[in-house]
Amino acid sequence: MSQSRESFTDYDGFVEKFKPKKTTDDCYTPPEIYAVVLDYVRERWGVEEADVVRPFWPGGDYEAFEYPEGCVVVDNPPFSILSKIQAFYLERGIRFFLFAPSLTCLSGKRCMEVDHIVCDCSITYENGAVVRTGFVTNLDGENVLEAEPELGRRLNEANDTRLKATRKAVAKYEYPDDVITAARAQWFAAHGTPYRVRRRDACRISALDEQRERGKGIFGGGLLLSRAAAAERAAAERAAVERWHLSDRERAVQVALG
């Protein structure tokens, strides 16, 4: 099948090929998340922050990195070569506490030589990828697997706080019945309400005068409606929203009020 033919029959699949992929090797750790992990390591094993090293960064070479005597690697390595990295550190007696994909952390060839700390947490990394995350370490010489709820709780809390802080607050506007936008037409469609605007009943606008005074506009543009079309829009909106109605008894009570 030719490329043009493929794009015609499967446009979404064709476009998907050109989108940058979010891989676990690109999961750069948000500082807020790393701080929680570092605190946990320090509290549990008494590791001094001055002894902590981070050899993983874009373009870095962990094998050529100079590891000071007594150091501890606390970092988020490329998950695709995690098994190789663990072997490198185990063979050289370098202590480590590494991020790992939670569900597959036991798949390493030297699984029985390290401790696998599994948390109930999903971390949103800097590239937007959301990964169920656990950890592997040789700091613990007794355990091979742990379910660690407290670390998971701390990480989830930090992750949620970070997302709330970074999520942009989008202003929401309520337009009068005299204006219709594509977003509102989409709302009608989502609510199963057919709605049409005749060409003679509308003109395109990019902002209301009141918006221009405040340096704002209609996102994507909109249509200014005739009075008749505005009334039709209002009726369509009422039809799209399911409403409860008063019974005859309640109306009788209403008449007696006030």
Image (cartoon, helix red, strand yellow):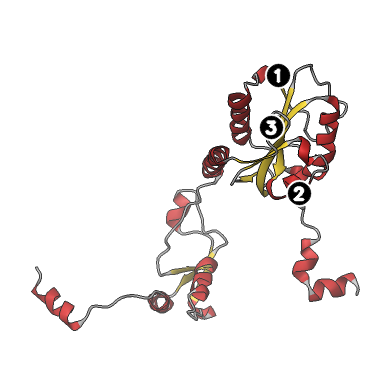
Res. 178 image quadrant = bottom left
Q: Secondary structure at mark 3?
A: loop
Q: Which mark is residue 142?
A: 3
Res. 60 image quadrant = top right
Q: Position of residue 87 (x, y in %)?
A: 84, 35
Lateral position of residue 184 relative to residue 3, left or right? left
Residue occupying the point 61% across, 24% down: 42
Lateral position of residue 249 relative to residue 218, left or right? left
Lateral position of residue 58 relative to residue 207, left or right? right
Q: Which mark is residue 23?
A: 2
Which residue is most to the bottom?
A: 248
Q: Position of residue 176 (x, y in %)?
A: 40, 65
Q: Earlier in the sequence, mark 1 or mark 3?
A: 1
Q: Secondary structure at mark 1?
A: helix
Of the two numbered discs 2 and 3 in the rendering, the one whose residue sits closer to the viewer: 3
Residue at label 1? 51
Please state which of residues 188 and 66 is positioned toward the viewer in this rendering: 66
Mark 2–mark 3 distance (CA, rounded to whole Å) = 33 Å
Of the two numbered discs 2 and 1 in the rendering, the one whose residue sits closer to the viewer: 1
Badge 1: few (under 14), some or many (20 or more) residues near its Cα, within 10 Å? some
Residue occupying the point 17% across, 77% down: 250
Mark 1–mark 3 distance (CA, rounded to whole Å) = 23 Å
> In the picture shown, does residue 14 fall above or below 247?
above
Q: Earlier in the sequence, mark 2 or mark 3?
A: 2
